[in-house]
């Protein structure tokens, strides 16, 4: 329910400009505010779990998410819905960390892979399912249903959690480093706003984007200084002394955040704007590969229990990298729809095999008392990496469109083009200006079409980088012997 909201809202955002009396740049804050709030709330979740227990933080997260889903649904202006989305993001952070921790704690080691595989159904299946559900609810009901649908689910979850979830017995009073939290929050807020608004404002050509970049560096720098001089740190970086944990985080950051999240963003755009499908039909096309995410997530968990998480991570990485390099870049306007749907299935398989073993790998290589922190770090890099990935995809679409437009213009014979436009004008009985405008739109469309291959190929680079860290999982380093 919570992760679904990260993509289901993407579909309805263009349709909110009228009801909320805003432009596209304004309604984009509905997505940005949610991501920022969730990323910041993650950083305080470990403290809350150890202080109050996973059960009550989980139920609180569900309640917050559900109440403010209702508030988002009844919103009639942009300010109110952004306010509600901030608290929805806080609710998601509480839900994600506590649910991970409870599942891993309640299942014996030999069943943890299967448990995470089933849990991975939601985590990896939901983002791909979002465009389908969002398109259906918007087309046949109302955009408000995207938010209202969370309310009955949330009520059922809260009641079930109170009845069935066991109480936490090992509660602790731990110190919380508010100074470090403040500075890392400043850095996170600045970098997420920069990434979400960079393409709109022109990246480093815009003074606000430059200022946000500078603020993010200052925020993270002061965070590091605070941690170095604090008795009680916000994040225990001793976790990264474990090679497998470090590689697991980097795999998650590059393959999921920078790589897979680009395809989550690009594939619906491809179906809607290149194949020119209606929103619902585009969602159904996305659902084709999403089904395979659902099928292979539990299978990945079972394999993790049988042959080990590392080997399954390797298998998922190989399938994903090969798909992103050799299959997805072949998609264009001329690809038949059924063929395009079939060609995305290997991506769904790789995605389905990915989440459960990486999560198991991270939690098995973190001390039991640091499990909450391991999940916080994992979800934090998912948000930041996903924001980077989406920003890169958006930037690359415009960049490669411009390059292809320029190349097409350079290759054109101006006399032949003007002769063609004259014939086009006479055939349709339109003015010369209308004929030129139509031809310009055609050129723009074709430049997007040819550019998409390069965008897909660029996204594949990050999967290749992530695969290097997958390979390092199987490299054994000899300990350095100290000399007397």
Image (spheres, grey):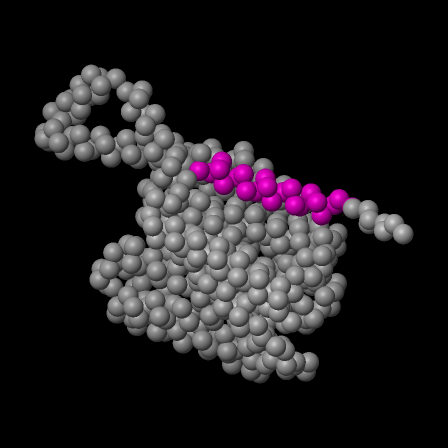
The residue positioned 15% from the left and 22% from the top of the image is 423
The residue positioned 25% from the left and 17% from the top of the image is 413
Q: Position of residue 222 (x, y in %)?
A: 53, 61
Identify the image quadrant of residue 229: bottom right
Report how many numbered discs are placed on residues in the image: 0
Q: Nearer the viewer, residue 326 or 364?
A: 364
Q: Position of residue 60 (x, y in %)?
A: 50, 78
Q: Is residue 458 visible?
A: yes
Identify the image quadrant of residue 370: bottom right
The residue positioned 36% from the left and 39% from the top of the image is 398
| Residue 43 to residue 246: above or below | below
214 is within the stretch colored magenta: no
In-image side of 150 versus 473 (left or right): left
Identify the image quadrant of residue 56: bottom right
Q: Nearer the viewer, residue 464 or 1?
A: 464
458 is within the stretch colored magenta: yes
Q: Position of residue 322 (x, y in %)?
A: 58, 37
In-image side of 406 versus 300 (left or right): left
The residue positioned 89% from the left and 52% from the top of the image is 484
| Residue 393 to residue 53: above or below | above
Dominant secondary-structure state across the stretch colored magenta: helix
Q: Position of residue 89 (x, y in %)?
A: 44, 67
Q: Nearer the viewer, residue 341 or 439?
A: 439
In-image side of 123 versus 89 (left or right): right
What is the span of residues highlighted in magenta in the rendered image? 455-476
Q: Is residue 125 visible?
A: no
């Amino acid at each position: 329910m919570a992760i679904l909201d990260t993509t289901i809202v993407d579909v309805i955002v263009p349709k909110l400009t009228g009801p909320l009396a805003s432009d596209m740049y304004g309604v984009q804050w509905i997505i940005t505010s949610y991501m920022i709030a969730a990323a910041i709330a993650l950083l305080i979740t470990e403290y809350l779990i150890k202080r109050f227990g996973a059960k009550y933080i989980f139920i609180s997260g569900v309640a917050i998410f559900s109440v403010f889903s209702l508030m988002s649904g009844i919103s009639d202006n942009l300010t109110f819905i952004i306010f509600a989305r901030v608290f929805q993001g806080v609710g998601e952070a509480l839900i994600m960390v506590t649910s991970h921790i409870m599942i891993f704690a309640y299942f014996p080691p030999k069943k943890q892979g299967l448990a995470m595989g089933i849990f991975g159904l939601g985590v990896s299946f939901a983002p791909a399912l979002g465009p389908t559900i969002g398109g259906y609810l918007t087309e046949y009901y109302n955009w408000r249903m995207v938010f209202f649908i969370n309310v009955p689910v949330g009520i059922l979850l809260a009641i079930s959690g109170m009845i069935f979830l066991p109480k936490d017995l090992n509660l602790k009073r731990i110190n919380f480093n508010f100074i470090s939290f403040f500075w890392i929050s400043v850095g996170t807020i600045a970098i997420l706003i920069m990434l979400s608004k960079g393409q709109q404002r022109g990246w480093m050509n815009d003074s606000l984007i430059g200022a946000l970049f500078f603020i993010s560096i200052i925020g993270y720098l002061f965070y590091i200084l605070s941690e170095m001089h604090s008795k009680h740190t916000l994040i225990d970086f001793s976790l990264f002394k474990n090679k497998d944990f470090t590689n697991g985080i980097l795999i998650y950051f590059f393959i999921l955040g920078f790589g897979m999240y680009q395809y989550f963003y690009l594939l619906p755009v491809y179906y809607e704007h290149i194949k020119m499908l209606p929103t619902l039909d585009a969602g159904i096309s996305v659902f084709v590969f999403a089904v395979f995410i659902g099928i292979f997530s539990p299978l990945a968990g079972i394999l993790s229990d049988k042959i080990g998480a590392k080997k399954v991570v390797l298998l998922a990485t190989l399938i994903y990298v090969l798909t992103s390099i050799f299959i997805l870049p072949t998609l264009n306007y001329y690809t038949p729809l059924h063929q395009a749907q079939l060609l995305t299935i290997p991506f769904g398989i790789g995605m389905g095999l990915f989440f459960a073993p990486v999560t198991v790998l991270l939690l098995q290589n973190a001390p039991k008392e640091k499990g909450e922190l391991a999940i916080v770090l994992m979800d934090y890099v998912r948000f930041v990496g996903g924001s980077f990935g989406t920003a890169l995809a958006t930037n690359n679409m415009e960049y490669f469109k411009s390059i292809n437009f320029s190349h097409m213009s350079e290759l054109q014979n101006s006399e032949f083009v003007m002769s063609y436009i004259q014939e086009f004008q006479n055939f349709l009985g339109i003015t010369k200006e209308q004929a030129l405008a139509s031809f310009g739109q055609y050129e723009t469309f074709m430049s997007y079409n040819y550019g998409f291959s390069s965008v897909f190929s660029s996204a594949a680079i990050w999967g290749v980088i992530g695969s290097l860290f997958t390979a390092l999982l199987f490299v054994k380093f000899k300990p350095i012997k100290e000399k007397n």
